Amino acid sequence: MARRGKILEKKIRISGFSFVRDGIRLDYPIEESIRSALAIVDEYIVNVGDCTDNTLEVIRSIDDPKIRIIETNWNPDRFVDGATIADQTNIALEQCRYPWCLYLQADEVIHEDDFRLIVGAMEKYDSRDDVDGLLFHYNHLWGSYSRVHRGHNWYDREIRVIKNGRNIRSWKDAQSFRIDGRKLRVADCGARIYHYGWVRHPEVMRKKTIVMDGFYHDDEWIAKKHSDSGKPWDYGPLDRIPLLRETHPAVMRSRIESKDWQAEDYSDPDNPPDHEHLQLWCRIHSALERFIGRKIGGYSNWILTK
């Protein structure tokens, strides 16, 4: 099994790519995300937006020759329905030089125990013209490094590896990829994405949510949604969120150990949040899915092949 710090031997060449803006101010694990992939990629493209913090300096300090940084200015005219997120993803993708491309958003990390699954799947499907990419399984952490969403309203799989040179583009708000609007044909590689986007100090989580909502909605909507913008984010009761039964990626150890807050200290039981997973319909739907062991309905961004 491949371990951290070692380069995995492989027969193919891989580009990694990502984008980030104000990653340090908004507490993205961008350094951990990049480091998690360096053992298997031959280059890593990082599109750094016009930051107001030291994100650029932090990425430069990783000091790995595989990393190629490009700097961009984000167009406010594209802050509609998440379009700018796809734009920035595509800018990084266009710089990728190798046949396989691994995409990690700034709050996504891969596990060193899955390196062989990822590379093995690339080698297996390298000559298969009917396979456009690879599907990953998601761990969505919530409010704590020990709680993970498995509910109906959270996507459990998504495309994070694509083949280069097929006119594949980031789709809508960059959750997935398409070819001229067509769903990709993908194979399930069995590897995991650890999504840490919902594990932040509640005060920072509020700021990040306002910033992200600004990529989708106008100022009037933001003012109404976040009328009390100074109030810390309320994660709600964590005991309703399943425990994570797996280990975290090794690159996350220091960040996890340095966590000095508890979501419960910022929760108001008398005025609970209206998170979708707390609503009765979603709780019933999620319970039924747990009982039968699979998702019911829902939407997928891919066509699964073997």
Image: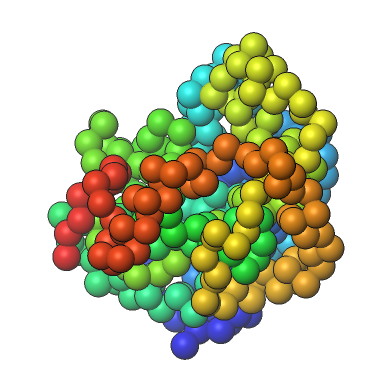
Residue drawn at x 44%, y 59% as measured from the top left: 150
Name the one closer to the observer, 232 or 137.
Answer: 232
- The answer, for residue 68, to whether it is visible in the render is no
Direction top: furthest residue: 220
Direction front: furthest residue: 270
Q: Position of residue 299 (x, y in %)?
A: 28, 43
Q: How is the image coloured?
A: rainbow
Residue drawn at x 22%, y 36% as measured from the top left: 182
- The answer, for residue 130, to whether it is visible in the render is yes
The correct choice, above or below, for 43 with respect to 48 in the image is below
Quick check: 48 left or right of 300? right
Q: Position of residue 273 (x, y in %)?
A: 63, 39
Q: Position of residue 103 (x, y in %)?
A: 47, 52
Residue drawn at x 25%, y 65% as measured from the top left: 292
Q: Position of residue 248 (x, y in %)?
A: 59, 73
The correct choice, above or below, for 139 with respect to 24 in the image is below
**Numbered circles on residues, count:** 0
Name the one closer to the observer, 210 or 283.
Answer: 283
Q: Quadrant where the C terminus lies?
A: bottom left
Name the one closer to the observer, 143 or 47.
Answer: 143
Residue drawn at x 66%, y 71% as measured from the top left: 251
